[in-house]
Image (cartoon, rainbow, N blue to C red):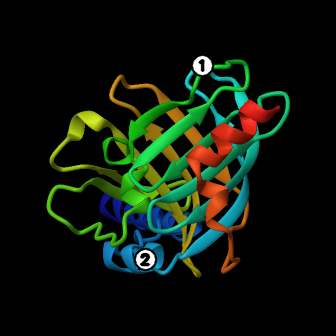
């Protein structure tokens, strides 16, 4: 009798465990790095509104325009009105509250270089330091393998179809900035002047 009771308990436990496992969907496998590299290399131009969460918790919004390779424009909406331009080998940050020339940094020393490069290969040795799944999206954390002190960029991709949804840039000091995109509109044409640091500087001085 006791043996039958134990058998019944074990059977019920097994059924309950099976029911729970069937009720909870398995986590989707991350999109392979080769597919993500192909997607990023396929982006020639892209544009999207964005919402940014800064290191201090404050939020701002605006529009991002990407023209690969090596060009990006981040226009911040009022009251911020900051402008960030990646153009060629440099990144310039225009502070609307300052009359000084923009702060400039070598693009290769920023994590943005990893998504604006002419050819992107996420499978490159030591470039990707984490590849997984978070909140239903594939995540890839990448850094310059030769200069990890430049910081990291964590990319978030949806699947079916693959699409870039957001990124988190962690600078060399550990400060994090999250940029969440709307749906990217790809294939538009942009004049090169849109990404010109010198032209943007001249326009600001004329105001």
Disc 2 target residue:
41
- Between 127 and 93, the one nearer to me in the picture: 93
Answer few, some or many: residues within 10 Å of disc 2's Cα (few below 14, many 20 plus, some between 14 and 19).
some
Q: The residue tagged with tag 2: helix, strand or loop? A: helix
Q: What residue is at 60 percent from the left and 41 percent from the top?
A: 84
Query: Would you say the residues marked 2 and 1 are in contact, meaning their CB atoms lie under 8 Å apart?
Result: no
**Label 2 or label 1, whichever comes before in sequence order:** 2
Q: The residue tagged with tag 1: helix, strand or loop? A: loop
Q: Is residue 12 above or below residue 39?
A: above
- Residue 34, horizontal then vertical, whole percent: 32, 78
- Residue 23, horizontal then vertical, whole percent: 59, 66
Answer few, some or many: residues within 10 Å of disc 1's Cα (few below 14, many 20 plus, some between 14 and 19).
few
Is 201 left, or right, of 39 in this rendering?
right
Q: Which mark is residue 153?
A: none
**Residue 193 lies in quadrant:** bottom right
Q: Is residue 37 above or below residue 72?
A: below
Is 43 left, or right, of 179 in this rendering?
left
Disc 1 target residue:
56
Residue 51 at least partly seen: yes
Q: What residue is at 77 percent from the left and 29 percent from the top?
A: 80
Is 20 left, or right, of 3 in this rendering?
right
**Residue 106 lies in quadrant:** top left
């Amino acid at each position: 009798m006791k043996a039958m009771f134990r058998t019944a308990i074990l059977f019920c436990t097994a059924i309950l465990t099976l029911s729970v496992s069937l009720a909870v969907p398995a986590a989707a496998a991350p999109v392979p790095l080769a597919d993500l590299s192909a997607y990023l290399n396929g982006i020639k131009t892209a544009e999207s509104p964005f919402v940014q969460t800064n290191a201090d918790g404050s939020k701002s919004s605006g529009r991002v325009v990407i023209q690969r390779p090596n060009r990006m424009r981040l226009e911040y909406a009022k009251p911020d009105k900051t402008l960030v331009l990646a153009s060629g080998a440099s990144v310039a940050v225009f502070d609307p509250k300052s009359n000084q020339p923009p702060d400039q940094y070598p693009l290769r020393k920023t994590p943005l270089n990893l998504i604006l490069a002419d050819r992107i290969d996420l499978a490159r040795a030591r470039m990707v330091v984490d590849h997984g799944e978070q909140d239903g999206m594939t995540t890839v954390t990448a850094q310059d393998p030769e200069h990890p002190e430049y910081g990291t960029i964590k990319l978030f991709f949806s699947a079916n179809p693959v699409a870039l949804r957001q990124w988190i840039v962690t600078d060399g000091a550990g400060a994090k900035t999250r940029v969440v995109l709307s749906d990217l509109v790809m294939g538009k044409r942009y004049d090169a002047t849109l990404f010109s640091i010198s032209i943007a500087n001249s326009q600001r001085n004329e105001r």
